[in-house]
Image (cartoon, helix red, strand yellow):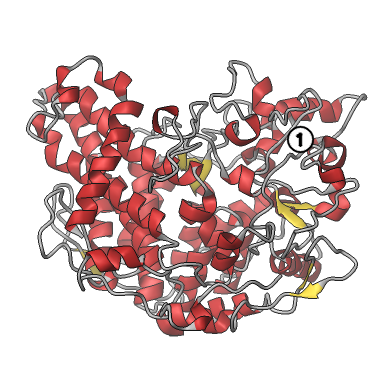
Amino acid sequence: MKKYILTAAAVLSAGLFTSCNDMLDTDPRVTQMTQATFPGKPADAVAELAATYSIMNTMGGGDCDTQNPFYWWEIMSDNCYGSGGLQDNKVKSLHHLVEMNVNQYEQAFILLYGGISRANNTIETIDNITWSEAQKADRNQYLGEAFFMRGLYTLWLTQLFGDVPLITSTTITPEMEKQVSAEEFIYPQILSDFSSAISLMKEERANGSGHADRYAAEAFLARAYMFWAGFYKNVKDLATGDATINLVKQEGCDKESLAKADVVNALKDIYDKGGYKLCEDFRSLWQYSNSLLWKEANDEDGHSYEFIKDMKEENCFDKPGMGNGNTEEIFQIQFMNASAWGINGERKNGGIYSTARMYSNYISVFWGLRNGKSNQNGDRNFTYPFNQGWGQGTPSCNIWDDWTLAENAGNYTDLRKRASMIDLVNELQGYTFEADDCEESGYSVKKYAEVNLDACDANNDTWWSKCEGYSSSSLANKMQGDHFEDFYLMRYADVLLMLTELTGNVSYMNQVQARAGVPLTTAYSLKAVQDERRWEFCFEGIRFNDMRRWTGKDCKNSNYAPDALQAQSGKQIVCNGDKANKRAMQHMTCSWTERYKATNGFLSKPQSQITLMDGNLEQNPGWDAADPNTQYKALY
């Protein structure tokens, strides 16, 4: 592990001094940096933090099927199928909870440990800088952000891989090389890191700067606690249950333990002081509601996207308070027009890091349409206003059908269903499937879908190219490079729904329901919260870990996750582009129930890292490579 971590830190440091060079000015220490000399001034600490945040850009901007855990968790849930073409086997292996090879999930493992290493460096060296009394608040803010990012990367790491080495220093001791219990050691550290961040950071909001603030730390404290309490401590319903976790003493964290009441107080601090509010219109959160497309819809000539025609212009995605940096966005991955095929613009085919397109929200491409009309993907005549993509991770029949059943039972229409998904048959004119399409449900993700305009040319320009201040695509490939919609990691709606789930007070959830225009829940039930979270956050990377915490480790709470996953079996899907002859969805090797119960929803740890660690890292249950049920098998 020591060999691996140090190698990762060395490779990742290259990105620090290329992507953040402007922050370092011309300080000669750029070429002679050690922990003794760097950071030397406040701007250096800012540069270190930028490098720590940039790990999220790499995960969100690279190939989603190899390194984007938020995309993975949607594919692994009952919200999405693997889909794509016959050759798109990585995404299908995720959906069926199997692996193509023993190192398939290594890239996320490496990136997350790299981010932890960067955060550790800031925590250890923050006082290399001589801080004046007037700068102490800034010092604490930067330190708090480093604690927050360490906690966040560690949370994602352990949710993906379970028991792993807990790295809390840049000097890796033999003890740190050993895999430890997530329940007993890793979650106490995660929640201590978030607690430190809350204590150290200012009360001021980050306001779309891309930095974390104390409100983000409070929200993620709740999310981490709820997963720990539900999955590990088997608290089936947090409205009536409780669990207390011991904390680690460190700067900013002097409390000995954390209980549900402390988490509720943290969320209420956001509610009372954060100044967040839900956007008036749910559609305002997504780029298809931009004002350029809205104007086309309200002009008499040309195409008209009827779904947004009735919106108020001031609620369009690109208007103040909407879209990126909107009034309910608490934390996010931000993107910009600075993508390249690799570090310094070079594609590094043999490298272990995929930095290509790291500043473009590449999930838009993975969820983009595969339209087979004359083999012209994304032809606006057939897909307007949506554009070309890889067609992977299509929404499952399950989420559409379950949602429709809920609407019919309650005699209402939930705007969020059509605001989140494209109904390919009824919403697009003449849409056809590619000849090699498989696991097609007839739906596509709308939330992060690529958006085109009549004004865009035949080179698959996105609507961003028509925005004020746009410059030529840095990637020289607009279809892959021009995607700048924030990926939401925490929205205020989640704060409201977590408050309801923790307290049983439905008034918080009612605010989310009122915005959606659906009937308000009058009496608390866990099922009502479960449904509301699924509808509100579909395709935002939240569903799978919600399913897991409601199930509990080894299904001690319920069979919620295995039952929901197994319900995919038998659904009618399109394969090989043949709509006339649908086939029943089936599991690749055995059943979703069997694969979920065998793995508890954890992925396989990379064998290369297990080998490097000489017995200190053990493979997760359910991932014996000799077992054919764990291995990818072509179905189509």
**Measured from the top left, where is residue 538 in percent x and y?**
61, 57
Instruction: Pick the residue in front: 207 or 185.
Output: 185
Q: Is residue 294 above or below residue 117?
A: above
* Quadrant (top left/top right/bottom left/bottom right) for the N terminus: bottom left
**Measured from the top left, where is residue 29 in percent x and y?**
15, 22
Q: Which residue is mark 1?
A: 311
Quadrant for residue 221, please give it: bottom left
Instruction: Pick the residue in front: 309 or 27.
Output: 27
Does the rendering let one see residue 533? Answer: no
Q: State the residue lying farthest toward the front.
A: 350
**Measured from the top left, where is residue 315 in percent x and y?**
68, 32
Number of numbered markers: 1
* Quadrant (top left/top right/bottom left/bottom right) for the C terminus: bottom right
Q: Is residue 404 above or below residue 328?
A: below
**Measured from the top left, where is residue 397 in percent x and y?**
74, 67
Quadrant for residue 174, please give it: bottom left
- Horizontally, residue 578 falls left or right of residue 96, namely right
Q: Residue at x 82, y 45 (%)?
A: 375
Instruction: Pick the residue in front: 356 or 468.
Output: 356
Q: Residue at x 40, y 54 (%)?
A: 107
Mark 1 lies on a secondary structure that is: loop
